[in-house]
Amino acid sequence: TSICTGFAASAAVTKTKGNNYQGYKVLHFYFEDSDEAIRRKYYGHILDIDAMHLSDPDIRPRAIEELKNLKEEQKLLKANIIGKRLASGEETASMIKRRIESYIAKGFKPDLVIIDYFECLKSEDAQNFHDTEWTKEGITMRKLESICNEKQIAMWVPIQGNKGSLGAEFVGLMHGGGSVSKIQIGHVVITLARTEEQKSQHRLNVFIQKLRGIAIGRDKFLNVKFNNGTCKFDMTDTGDVDDEVF
């Protein structure tokens, strides 16, 4: 959730010629966190203050004062991000599509949709009586892919790892929980691994497993700093691999 929130916040405040320097519009669907927790993560991101400290009496006045000086970023976040908490296990990909269409009809056309996370979705209906739960996972992910193509949007859909991924130094495609077909459908696949030691150091390993359409250059970034409270990666001390500059 923190990583997805970081992706969303970065998209919302990134001004390019492609978005007329107004940032990208994001629909952020989440199932487990409260609305308040998600809002705090967004504020933690733009203020660079750990979300858990925003209510601290010694920090809150400074945070409010800094927000006043970040009016442009605040406006971009408010204009470009819609967050919606959904009921876990009750929403299908088809229902997500209808929600996206509803927002578009109201004038909010997202560039990016985040579904946090796949296992909280209800599977699409089986295509035949013999379809297994794993088969239905593939059908659901394929449905999400078709939404991207039809609506011309990007979508991040994190999935959980299997038990072999827990505490592992490397997490590959084989470590994805459930059906492998839902992973194979992905156009970009990033895996995250964190050992028990790295947890206490707020670090993790990042691996680029798939980039459909272009060659993968550097495919691993080891011991990357990640602040769960500000939803930010720090890649400054990851170094280079085989003299290839990142």
Image (cartoon, rainbow, N blue to C red):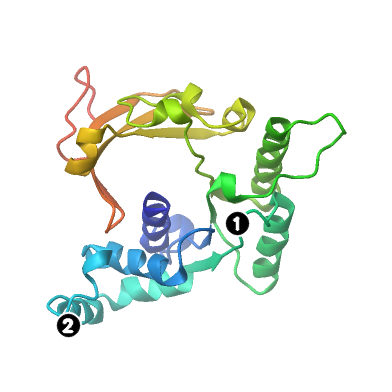
Mark 1: which amino acid? Ser
Residue 156 against residue 77 in the figure, above or below: above
Residue on which the image places disc 2: 61
Quarter of the image where the C terminus is located: top left
**Pointer 2 with pointer 1, Cβ within 8 A:** no
Residue 195, located in which quarter of the rendered image? Answer: top left
Q: Amino acid at mark 2?
A: Pro
In the rendering, at what x and y percent does residue 11 appear? 41, 56
Q: Identify which residue is drawn at 22% across, 36% down.
A: 198
How far apart marks 2 and 1 lie (CA) works out to 36 Å
Q: Nearer the viewer, mark 2 or mark 1?
A: 1
Q: Is residue 171 visible to us here?
A: yes
Q: Secondary structure at mark 2?
A: helix
Which callout, 2 or 1, points at the residue further toward the start of the chain?
Answer: 2
Q: Quadrant of residue 37?
A: bottom left
How far across and how far down the image is residue 78, in percent?
43, 74
**Number of residues whose C-alpha sits closer than 10 Å to that of mark 1, classed few (under 14), some (14–19) or many (20 or more):** some
Q: Which residue is mark 1?
A: 88
